[in-house]
Image (tube, coloured by chain):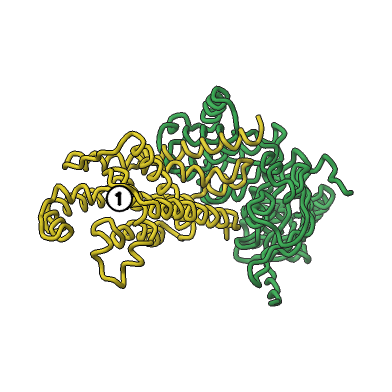
Amino acid sequence: MTTTPRTLAIAATGLRKAYGDKTVLDGIDIHVPVGTVFSLLGPNGAGKTTAVNILSTLISADAGEARVAGHHLTREAQAVRGAIGVTGQFSAVDGLITGEENMLLMADLQHLSRREGRRITAELLERFDLVEAAKKPASTYSGGMKRRLDIAMTLVGNPRIIFLDEPTTGLDPRSRHTMWQIIRELVAGGTTVFLTTQYLDEADQLADRIAVLNGGKLVAEGSAEELKRLIPGGHVRLRFADPVLYERAATALREATRDDEALTLQIPSDGSQRELRAVLDWLDAAGIEADELSVHTPDLDDVFFALTASPVPAQPAN
Amino acid sequence: MSPATYAVRDNLTMLRRNLLHARRYPSLTLNLLLTPVILLLVFVYIFGNVMSAGINGGHADRSQYVAYLLPGILLMTIGGTAIGTAVTVATDMTEGIMARFRTMAISRASVLIGHVVGSVIQIMASLLLVLGVGVAIGFRPNATPLEWLLAIGLLTLVSIAMTWIAVGMGMASPNAEGASNMAMPLMILPFLGSAFVPVHLMPVWFRWFAEYQPFSPAIETLRGLLLGSGIGTRNAVLAVGWCLALSLLGYLWSKAQFNREPRR
């Protein structure tokens, strides 16, 4: 008998899902240690939501095995459901009733006592800045408020593992930062977070580990730093105000890439201190003084585009 | 607490949710109530003499027709309110919160049972209103307490059967409009039975359908109970049989649909 080590909140191998002859997930492995943030990153239609739906027991996989919170995903589905909380892409609130009634509904379904339900509702409404709107129908809420209510409802049962499917899609920058803060607080409290996003800075900001999903396959996995190291693109950029100085520098620095319009030179560099010093020494030796020097490391956008740009091979019909 | 206690609590929670919806947004139920009430008034005050003359061989007495018509109108009220159930269920299934319910450790059946019980309660309230209108315009039932009890039992059984069918229809429909169309026969069927006109006055080729369709035996039995005119064992057995069969069918159909994976 194989058992999952206690330290893994989510352990899935070979998850596969197809609708008709369209393969959505083509055998993916996911391992998420307890208390960490795992981010599934990918463009629209990559299969992120399908992965969340499978791991949250909403749909079943065609193949593969998974344990969530130590429970078998299909054989112990109710136990899995008892350990998880899900906030999907489409707000899972009851628009016809008020925010407070939504919260009390969750408390009842979590089988809390009346008193405990009222206490948690008041506490979460306060924490998510929904006290003023508590008595209004949820359908009248703004996008950001709905999302906050959605997460507040998810938290009523104090789940150990939370799935957040594109939690900030469609939110304004302020609401987005509020959401990030909420997620950080959750993790600080020991919750495991499974996050999908199409925003790279979001994964960069929040996730301990990032997996890039494209065309139903995981094309890369690692920390943000590890992913950035996967692709080249780091450089030092020198900007000049004086065209004459620019010309002189360009002649001296043969390996630099020229941008004559912007009067800037790009020198390949991994951004390490040693390489940077070499560049500076070189400039000093040549008597060149740039008006501005900046160091660029590849960001996740570069990684993302490099990994997902190639067209997905057509799926064989079967 | 045991799983069974939890299941009961989940059912009650879902029932509360549905009653809250009905209380906050009563317009759907009230609109559907309008049809049987208007038909009752029109058929009594405008067509009443003609109808009673036709039924009684020339003798026009619309107060007699009230007594004939009201049991059928009550059954029609059940069918009409069930249309509302189908619409509500169809709408509810497209709501995001349904996905949340599916990922929670709750009794899955509670989602459907909440709808059914809530709906039956709404139907009972509607029946009381329509009966009130009937009494106001001269309906004078002479049922004994036992007959009243049996009448209420029969109406409850029909309500449960119609509601389970309506829940199934609501789940099979992609949206509220589709559900409303699909459930329309629940309101139309009493017309094609003995609600307005005795079956023996209908064209011969149609009588078989009119007599054995689900509503007619229930209408005849209710008439017998409320007016003390005897119920006839065959109608009573047919009525209860239809109710049990339709309840079971509706339940299995709804359950199968609810357990099917959402396609999204």
Q: Position of residue B43 (x, y in %)?
A: 17, 54
The chain containing the residue under callout 1 comes to B
Query: Left or right of B192: which side holds A147?
Result: right
Provide the residue designation for mark 1: B32
Q: In this rendering, would B39 be left or right of B161?
A: left
The quadrant where residue A20 appears: bottom right
Q: Residue furthest bottom?
A: A317
The residue lying toward the viewer, choosing from B252 and B84, is B252
Measured from the top left, where is residue B198 in percent x and y?
A: 25, 59
Say few, some or many: other residues with alpha carbon within 10 Å of mark 1 (under 14 / 14 to 19 / 20 or more). Answer: many
Residue A191 drawn above or below residue A218:
above
Image colour assigned to chain B:
yellow
Q: Which part of the image, by quadrant, shows the C terminus of chain B?
A: bottom right
Compared with residue B39, is residue B6 higher up or lower down, i.e. above or below? above
In percent of the image, x 43 and y 52: which residue is there?
B237
Q: Quadrant of the N terminus of chain B?
A: top right
Examine the rendering and report whether any part of residue B152 can be seen. yes
- The picture quadrant where one finds residue A69 is top right
Res. A280 in view: no
Q: Position of residue A57 (x, y in %)?
A: 66, 50
Colour of chain A, in one word, is green
Q: Secondary structure at mark 1?
A: helix
- Image spot of residue B106 (x, y percent): 61, 40
